[in-house]
Image (cartoon, rainbow, N blue to C red):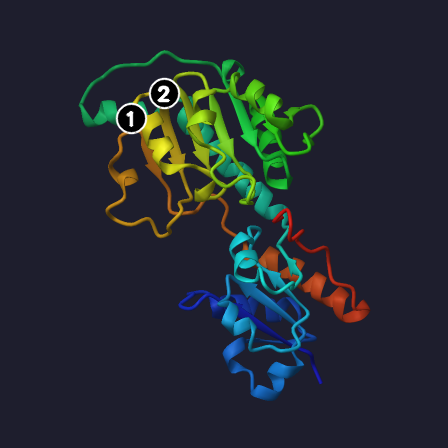
Amino acid sequence: MQPVIPFIAAPGYRFTTQWVDVLQQALPECTVVPVEFLSSDQRTQVEVAVVANPDPQTLRLLPNLKWVHSVWAGVERLLSDLQDWQLPVVRLKDPELARTMAEAVLAWTMYLHRDMPAYRQLQAERRWQPLEYTPARARRVSVLGTGELGGTALKLLQQTGFQVSGWSRRGNGPEGVRCFSGEQGLQAMLAETDILVLLLPLTPQTRGLVNAALLKKLPAGAALINFARGDIVDDADLRTALDTKHLRHAVLDVFSQEPLPAQSWHWSHPSVTVLPHISAPTTRDTAAQIVAQNLRRWLASGEIPESVDLQQGY
C-alpha cells in the first residue's frame, strides 16, 4: 500500500488543489491528499505532512506525526504555533526561490536608484524636471541577511555594478563581497549605506531590530527595502524616519498584519511603496521536486532532512 502524505494549509488557502496535484506528480509512489480527506485510521498512520502555514490544531489530529515539511522558506509562524511541541520542521530550500528574490531585490533597488518614486511624483504634478543621475558604481547597497537569499541577491547587485556589503550574525557571505558581523560591524556598514535591504529571518533577536536607533545610523536620504518580515521593523519609528525625511523612501513588501488593512498609513504615505508580499513567491513545480526528494529519502532511510534550529528560528 502506498504511503499517504497529507497536505495541510491555512484555513481558506486558495491553492491547496494545485499543491496536491504538483506534489502527486513529483511523488507518484505516494498518495498525496488534503488532510481533510483522511479517515481516522489513516490519520493515525501519518508520520510526515507537507504544510503551508497550517492550523496547529489540525496537525494535532495526527497523533503519530514525526516531522513536517513546509513549502515556504519562512517558518517563524509555524515555529510559534508549535513552540510547545518539539516537532522537527523542515523549511523549503529552493535555488529558484533565491533567484526570484535576487531578481526582486535588483528590480526594486533599481527603482530607488533611478529615482522612480520622484519621477512618479513629478508626473502627478505635470512637471518636466530631469534629476541628477548617480551611477551604480557610486551607489552603496547593503543587505541585512547573507544566507542563501541574501547571498544570491548580493552577487546580482554586485554584477550590476553597485557597491555592496552584507551583514549577518556570523559575518558569512558570498566570496568577493565585504561582509560584517556584530554590533560594531552593523554600525560601520549602516554608515556607508544608501539603500538598505532586509532579508533576515524573523527571530527573537531580529524582531524590532530596525528601530529608531538603527535608522539614525543610516545617512540622511537613505532608502529601505523590506523583503524579510514586517515585525523586523518598528513601524512607528519607520514612519517618523520617513516623515522627517531622514529616509527618502521605503519599499515594503511585508507587514505585521497581512493583508495590509485599508486604514493603514502606509497606503497613502508619499514616501512608501506598498507591495502585496510578492517579492519571492514559491514556484510550485521546483518546490514540489525538492519536497519529493526529501520525502523519498526519508521513506528509504528514515532520516529526517536538516530541520530548523528551534532556538535560532531558522
- Amino acid type of the residue tagged 1 in the rendering: Asp
> Please, which residue is most extreme toward the left here?
126
Residue 59 placement: quadrant: bottom right
For mark 2, what is the residue? 246
Q: Residue at x 34, y 35 (%)?
A: 236
Q: Residues within 10 Å of mark 2 (few under 14, many from 20)?
A: some
Residue drawn 33% across the image and 14% down it: 131
Q: Give left or right: position of 101 versus 147.
A: left
Please give the name of the residue rendered at 24% of the width and 22% of the height, measured from the top-left corner: 122
Q: Tag 2, which secondary structure?
A: loop
Question: With respect to residue 39, does 226 lie above or below?
Answer: above
Q: Is residue 155 visible?
A: yes
Find the distance from the CA under tag 1 to the CA under tag 2: 8 Å
Q: Quadrant of the N terminus?
A: bottom right
Q: Which label is found at residue 21? A: none
Q: Residues within 10 Å of mark 1 (few under 14, many from 20)?
A: some
The front one of 239 and 93 is 239
Where is residue 223 drawn, in percent x and y? 42, 25
Vertical position of residue 142 compared to residue 33: above or below:
above
Name the amino acid, label 2.
His
**Which residue corresponds to mark 1?**
243
